[in-house]
Image: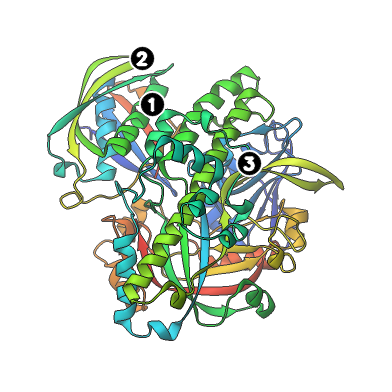
Amino acid sequence: MSIPIEKIGPFKYQIPITYQEGMRVPGIFYCDETLLESIRRDESLQQLANAATLPGIVKAALAMPDMHFGYGLPIGGVVATSVKDGVVSPGGVGFDINCGVRIMGTSLFRKDFMNKERLEKAIMALYRHVPAGVGSKSKLKLNSKDQRTLLERGSEWAVSRGYGSQSDLEHTEARGRLDGANPDLVSQRAYDRGKDQQGTLGSGNHFMEIQYVSDIYDLEAARCFGLAQDQITVMIHSGSRGLGHQICTDYLSVMGKAAVKYGIILPDRQLACAPINSPEGQRYLGAMRCAANYAWGNRQCLMHWAEEAICRGLDISPKELGMALIYDVAHNIVKMERHKIDGQEMEVAVHRKGATRAFGPGHPDLPAEYRKTGQPILIPGDMGTCSYILKGTQRAMEETFGSTCHGAGRVLSRNAALKASKGRSIAAELAEKGIIAIAAGRETLREEMPEAYKEISSVVGVVHDAGIALKVARLKPVGVIKG
Amino acid sequence: MVRPYQRIDTTADVGLFSSGATPQEMFVNTAKGLFSLIVPLRQIRNRCSHEARVEAQTLEDLLVAWLNELIFIHETEGLIFRHFTMTFMDEKGLVAVCSGEHIDTKRHKLMAEVKAATYHRLSVLRSPDGLWHARVILDV
């Protein structure tokens, strides 16, 4: 059955509350007509309608223009539930808890990489020095006390071990640590999976990329974020690794039983949930925060290895490289936040699954230097195209619980990408564009080829035109390593 | 001849459709399908074995739990498996011996990291010809 949708704004569509029994709010999503075609091709609109049935959901089940099929809530989905009488759902966060992105500025410029050999040296050094791919092992050996501290303190733990500085914490969403993380709520299986993976990149769409600033759209904001034309930046995309995946798996099972216990009727098992104030809800939140902190520690360590590797590859000092964290954002997480709903401020659990926080100017949770511009938002594109830095807006605060898109979103399945790239060398095609790409996995480059993703510029164009984030700069890749 | 397992398309991830003459055989074939996503199966030598024990409330949930147990052993022990023998299996539990070897990055062409088996579009059924089939989507 075709899902009825109504256009309610230039880039805004609605699935009416009458579409499906049990919907408590409408589904609202942002896109343009071209993106709508690919959105209609998968099950994500139905998943958005399903999410609208969650008890305690407020305003609307929202989705960003990069929306596509996910487990439970679609990727690109944002759901806020009332802390007083709403539910929390692991399916609203995803398996890779606190999958996210960080970007570092450097003192280098594009001209420093005009010499191809130099770029190759930097990329090869990253590839050798940063553990990536299936079965890769961390350089860190964590005993159980270390693991507990990491789960409680996130980035702070990494900094206390010498991986980074205090200013990195200022430049990380939530200062790289969610309070209320309880390591006792994490299963031994999750500990076992996470033990050797702190400071590893992972595989699939995770990457580390050397880029340059190709376009600046907002000079004032770019200056504030420390960005200049042609400047070299380094981007990291990774998450909470096996520890987070296991926590999601563990709690999906807990929540499946809890939903029955609390009489919650679910249109999809992957949306399993429990009241926030129930023991099951609180236990999930305590464990989920541990995974979020693990992921922040992970990206903090990865940043440290990246700095070491690039310095080694180029034979320069950290001072000459001048690597500094601009910002780090989570895009799979649930957080307690205060938002205005129908004029009333209330505390809600904002589930962002493949969606980025986009707090606007003046928000007290932002570091002082970004409070005037709004939050830096990092949107990675596919490895052959470009990535964007945007800034948060007041409009996002009003319309989307301070949220925006997170990336390009897949259009081709991995299998379809393998078929479409049969007989082609993606590495050679990228090299022709001046991009060096190396992957640990045999099929990774083909599965992750540029055509497998939506056009990032259209996704970013929609959020910009809809005003739920504004373009600051565009970054083009020169080298990428993948798992 | 029915294929023991095949990949099915989903936009974000990978699905498996597996078959077998008995539930045991279908479970074994799904496990082979899982490891075929991680590494070409022919590259796995038979060097060591590991026991897996799983319990669940239904046959469908048992399949998800079985795959999640294999993902757990693979990730924590660095093992990859090619042969599976069910020493016991009923609707609510199984004990299996899984044979294979440790990952050797020099010899194994590793492909995907599988995060989890999901409940999405999960189905286990017996067709009129008596064969058992399963569909399961994996988050990769």
Mark 2 lies on a secondary structure that is loop
Which amino acid type is marked by label 2? Glu
Vertical side of B41 occupied by A14: above or below? below
- Judge whether A367 appears above or below A227 on screen: above
B13 lies left or right of B131: right
Q: Are marks 3 and 2 on the same chain?
A: no
Q: Residue at x 36, y 14 (%)?
A: B91
Mark 1 residue type: Ala
**SS of the residue under disc 1:** helix
User: Which residue does the numbered mark 3 point to in the structure image?
Assistant: A179
Which mark is nearer the camera, 1 or 3?
A: 3
Q: Is the same chain shared between marks 1 and 3? A: no
User: Which amino acid does the dot numbered 3 rest on?
Assistant: Asp
Mark 3 or 2, closer to the camera: 3
Mark 1 residue crowding within 10 angstroms, few (<14) / some (14–19) / many (20+): many
Q: Position of residue A152 (x, y in %)?
A: 55, 40
Q: Name the residue under label 1.
A: B65
Q: Name the residue under label 2.
A: B91
Query: Label 3: how many residues lie within 10 Å, few (<14), some (14-19) or many (20+)?
Result: few
Name the residue at 59% across, 34% down. Answer: A286
Describe residue A359's horizontal placement relative to residue A308 as left or right.
Answer: right
Marks 1 and 3, how far apart at CA: 31 Å
Q: Position of residue A200 (x, y in %)?
A: 38, 52
Q: Which chain does the numbered disc 1 sit on?
A: B
Let me know if residue A429 appears in the view: yes
